[in-house]
Amino acid sequence: MEAKQALRRGQQARRRRDNIIAASAVVVALALAGVLQGTVFASNPTAEQYAAVQAGLGSPSASPTASATPSAAATNAPGIPAASTAAGKTFTGSLVLNTGTLGIQIDGTKAPQAAAVFKSLADKGTLKGRVCHRLTTSATASILQCGAEDASGKSDPTYTWGPLENTPSDQKYPAGTIAVARTADNAYGNGQQFFIAYKDSTFPNDSAGGYTIVGHVTSGLDVITKIAAAGVKPGGSSADDGSPVTPVTIDSFTLN
């Protein structure tokens, strides 16, 4: 009788042990699944993130998101050229629009990372066929913004970089300034879009700061003033901010 009771106690102990092992395996499997799922979704932008990038890069003005101070996560996307490739160098070239040609100069001494990016874009011909989708004609902000993939202002959400460089302490962008458009409140939200001030303009800093001045127009600024004179299409964000009445595309962007 005692032997049977001992056998039953042993069987019960084994069942408890097996149950504990099985439960532990389930917990581990669920945790692993969660990690894998998190990794997959973290590697691709959500619809909300994509929309936020589009909206931010579509305007040099601000809408709140990221911190102004670069953190460990504030890094350049893959494929962004190193700042060292342009540091200390000055590039000259031309921005040929369907409406005329502008001479330009890009300054790698004051904005080496931005200069490296735009020299790379010029060498690859990336900006050819891109759209100048935004025109502002207010008394304090007079810019033409270019580099969008289409008239909606779409940009590549995987091509982002920083940090901010050569931002004006007085928040003023003189006529002829070429500056980098970016996602608001994000020092690493620069992309492939840029804006040209065709008159002296002022843009208040957001939490990240100002906008990187990468160069200036050396000739042909009247090409943009003529575009501005035709005005903004109705239906934009305001009467002096929207798509230019004259459709504007980039025929070529070259730097030497």
Image: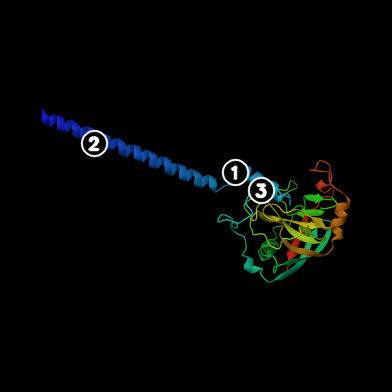
Q: Which three-letter amino acid code belongs to the residue tagged 3?
A: Val
Residues at marks 3 and 2 touching, judged by CB atoms closer than 8 Å = no
Label 3 and label 2: CA atoms lie apart by 57 Å
Quarter of the C terminus within the rendering? bottom right
Could you say whether the residue bearing mark 1 is in a helix, strand or loop?
A: loop
Sort mark 1 into few (<14), some (14-19) or many (20+) by Cα contacts within 10 Å.
Answer: few
Residue carrying label 1: 46
Position of 54 compared to 138: left or right? left
Distance between the Cα atoms at labels 3 and 1? Answer: 11 Å
Q: Secondary structure at mark 3?
A: helix
Mark 1 or 2, closer to the camera = 2
The numbered mark, 3 or 2, whose residue comes first in the sequence reads: 2
At which x and y percent is residue 192?
69, 56
Of residue 119 and residue 112, the one placed in the foreground of this image is 112
Category of crowding for the residue at label 2, using alpha-carbon neighbours closer than 10 angstroms: few (below 14), some (14–19), many (at least 20)? few
According to the image, label 3 marks what residue?
Answer: 53
In the picture, residue 173 is in which quadrant? Answer: bottom right
Amino acid type of disc 1?
Thr
Give the labeled residue for mark 2. Answer: 14
**Relative image position of residue 17 (x, y in whole percent):** 27, 37
Q: Which badge, 1 or 2, comes first in the chain's sequence?
A: 2
In the image, what residue type sits under mark 2?
A: Arg
Q: Look at the picture and state if 147 lies above or below 38.
A: below
